[in-house]
Image: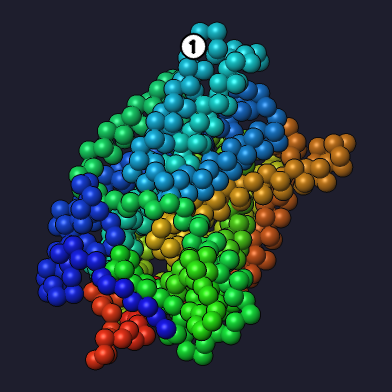
């Protein structure tokens, strides 16, 4: 049977009318004083705008480093193209895998607000070390001579930026999404737009990072650009603290992985028990603090953790009995694994934009008129512009049209949006291969604008896939694991970058016959075969797209009940609990089907 506990009060009980109920936010968040938030004074866009502005400045700093890293490694540290590509993609891997640790700490112990605060300090320290390495007399590289201390400080600095990003990215993005109440129809629609405009701010930071910052690096110096980035990051910290009264906070409740482990242990301990024919007989309790999840038929073996044992059999503690909601949360996390695996080739394709795409630009004609030469990293701006345009088009045109046409709250499902982006990535790799083949065959130096199609296609792909991945890993995660969910989204890019570096190493070893030939990745780009590497990525991505569609069509979205606090225990005349009748709310639709 389903066990019901009394509802917490706090002035928002069952007897409150709808107007009084809507005055307060009932999603387990608190205001800066630890009280239930007043809807009119906290959260929504008034708070999210502070957070979006910080994301703009953080991406400005990150991409000011990331898009020029390949150039710095080859031109300043004098590394070979293959070594520089591997070092660059290793750094990207660490930077995008660190959010898994940062997201866990934010959800479990530090809280999202404090995690962002601490990680910003680490980020600033990394930028200061980079500035010292580039400006201090005796540390600056000169000619072909690179002081060992400079190289050490440089790598320590960029990896401190990785650590700072590891806490900043998952906690900040999930903290921004926390400002919107899923149980309020208006704020739920605003949250759908939030992820779109978050990425517009992100891309605006990228755009300035790969144009203004890169121009300063090329014309003034790397040190001056890094000082600018440190100043911007310091200003972002001030902006972040300025909005503290308007934020809605989530109190960390310990390791979010423990309830998942308890479900697994309880399911194993009761593996020989028979599941009841009626799912309403499974154990559930409602303390009014969070929304419950509806029972689903996937992974039924885990349902045994929620069997309420009777008779002579004894049960004890949370390690023997789990609620239906805890079981469903475990199912959600397990179901995400195939989706995560199926999106890794997209991460591999995305890794090429800031490495080999930029390297191609260095070998092409970048003159804009007789006096101005476009910095190689600024070519990345094409992808940022395409992503901004795509996100704006989806939010303002495509989604409203699809809503009107289908009558659904969401115009395009999250998983379908990701799939569309992955298809654009396949096309981008194929176009990149064709352009590179033409560049190798051309007897004159081709214009850098030949790279526009591949950058634009990847930007469109990002506008669909990256935004979809962010929303998917935030929305479908249990509420106590949402920073970790954003970390999982970022780990798609990180693991993809790592797999790309391994693929480069393997392809280089095979194509060079153990180093006896130049192979696909020679010191001279004109003697390399990047086109074959692009075709290899296009083939892997295309084959994987079929696997992704198969996995996505079988996925079951999260189904929540109505507000926990507004439903009471349902008792009959004798006062005995009856099975709890959930009013389920479907969070999406299976791949648009």
**At which x and y percent is residue 539?**
69, 61
Quadrant in which residue 192 is drawn: bottom left
Image height check: is 552 above or below 88?
below
The answer to whether any part of residue 400 appears in the image is: no
Quadrant in which residue 123 is drawn: top left
Q: Residue furthest front?
A: 312
Name the residue located 53 percent from the left edge and 75 percent from the top edge. Answer: 314
**At which x and y percent is residue 183?**
28, 68
**At which x and y percent is residue 105?**
45, 45
Name the residue located 31 percent from the left edge and 47 percent from the top edge. Answer: 52
Quadrant in which residue 426 is drawn: bottom right
Name the residue located 46 percent from the left edge and 56 percent from the top edge. Answer: 256
Q: Is residue 139 left or right of residue 472?
A: right
The answer to whether any part of residue 234 appears in the image is: yes
Secondary structure, mark 1, is loop
Foreground pick, 373 / 577: 577
The residue wearing badge 1 is: 136
**At which x and y percent is residue 338?**
60, 66
Number of marks present in the image shown: 1
């Amino acid at each position: 049977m389903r066990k019901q506990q009394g509802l917490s009060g706090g002035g928002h009980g069952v007897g409150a009318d709808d107007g009084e109920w809507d005055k307060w936010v009932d999603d387990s968040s608190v205001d800066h004083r630890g009280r239930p938030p007043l809807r009119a004074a906290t959260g929504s866009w008034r708070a999210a705008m502070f957070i979006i502005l910080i994301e703009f400045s953080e991406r400005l700093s990150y991409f000011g480093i990331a898009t020029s890293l390949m150039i710095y490694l080859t031109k300043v540290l004098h590394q070979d193209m293959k070594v520089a590509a591997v070092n660059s993609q290793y750094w990207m891997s660490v930077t995008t895998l660190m959010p898994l640790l940062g997201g866990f700490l934010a959800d479990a112990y530090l809280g999202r607000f404090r995690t962002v605060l601490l990680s910003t300090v680490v980020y600033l320290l990394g930028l200061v070390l980079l500035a010292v390495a580039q400006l201090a007399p005796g540390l600056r590289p000169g000619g072909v001579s690179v002081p060992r201390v400079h190289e050490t400080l440089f790598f320590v600095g960029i990896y401190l930026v990785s650590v700072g990003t590891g806490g900043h990215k998952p906690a900040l993005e999930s903290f921004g999404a926390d400002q919107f109440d899923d149980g309020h129809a208006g704020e739920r629609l605003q949250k759908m737009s939030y992820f779109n405009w978050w990425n517009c701010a992100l891309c605006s930071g990228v755009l300035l990072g790969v144009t203004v910052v890169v121009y300063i690096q090329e014309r003034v110096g790397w040190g001056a650009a890094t000082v600018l980035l440190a100043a911007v990051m310091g200003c972002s910290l001030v902006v972040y603290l300025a909005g503290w009264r308007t934020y809605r906070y989530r109190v960390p409740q310990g390791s979010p992985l423990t309830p998942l482990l308890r479900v697994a242990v309880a399911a194993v301990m009761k593996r020989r028990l028979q599941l009841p024919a009626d799912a309403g007989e499974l154990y559930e309790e409602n303390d009014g603090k969070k929304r419950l999840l509806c029972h689903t038929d996937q992974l039924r073996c885990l349902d045994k953790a929620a069997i309420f044992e009777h008779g002579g059999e004894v049960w004890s503690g949370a390690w023997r009995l789990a609620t239906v909601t805890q079981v469903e949360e475990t199912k959600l996390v397990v179901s995400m694994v195939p989706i995560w695996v199926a999106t890794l080739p997209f991460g591999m394709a995305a890794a090429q934009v800031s490495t080999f795409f930029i390297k191609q630009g260095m070998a092409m004609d970048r003159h804009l008129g007789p006096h101005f030469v476009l910095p190689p990293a600024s070519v990345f701006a094409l992808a940022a512009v395409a992503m901004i345009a795509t996100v704006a088009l989806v939010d303002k045109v495509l989604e409203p049209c699809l809503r009107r046409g289908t009558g659904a709250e969401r115009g395009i499902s999250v998983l379908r949006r990701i799939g569309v982006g992955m298809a654009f990535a396949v096309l981008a790799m194929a176009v990149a291969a064709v352009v590179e083949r033409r560049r190798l065959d051309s007897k004159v130096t081709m214009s850098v604008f030949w790279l526009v199609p591949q950058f634009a296609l990847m930007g469109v792909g990002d506008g669909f896939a990256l935004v979809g991945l962010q929303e998917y890993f935030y929305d479908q995660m249990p509420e106590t694991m949402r920073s970790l969910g954003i970390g999982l989204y970022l780990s798609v890019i990180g693991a993809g970058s790592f797999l790309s570096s391994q693929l480069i190493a393997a392809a280089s070893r095979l194509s060079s016959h153990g180093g006896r030939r130049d192979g696909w990745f020679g010191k001279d780009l004109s003697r390399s075969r990047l086109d074959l590497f692009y075709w290899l990525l296009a083939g892997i991505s295309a084959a994987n797209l079929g696997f992704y569609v198969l996995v996505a069509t079988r996925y079951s979205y999260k189904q929540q009940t109505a507000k926990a606090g507004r439903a009471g225990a349902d008792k009959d005349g004798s006062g005995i609990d009856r099975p709890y009748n959930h009013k389920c709310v479907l969070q999406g639709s299976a791949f648009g089907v």
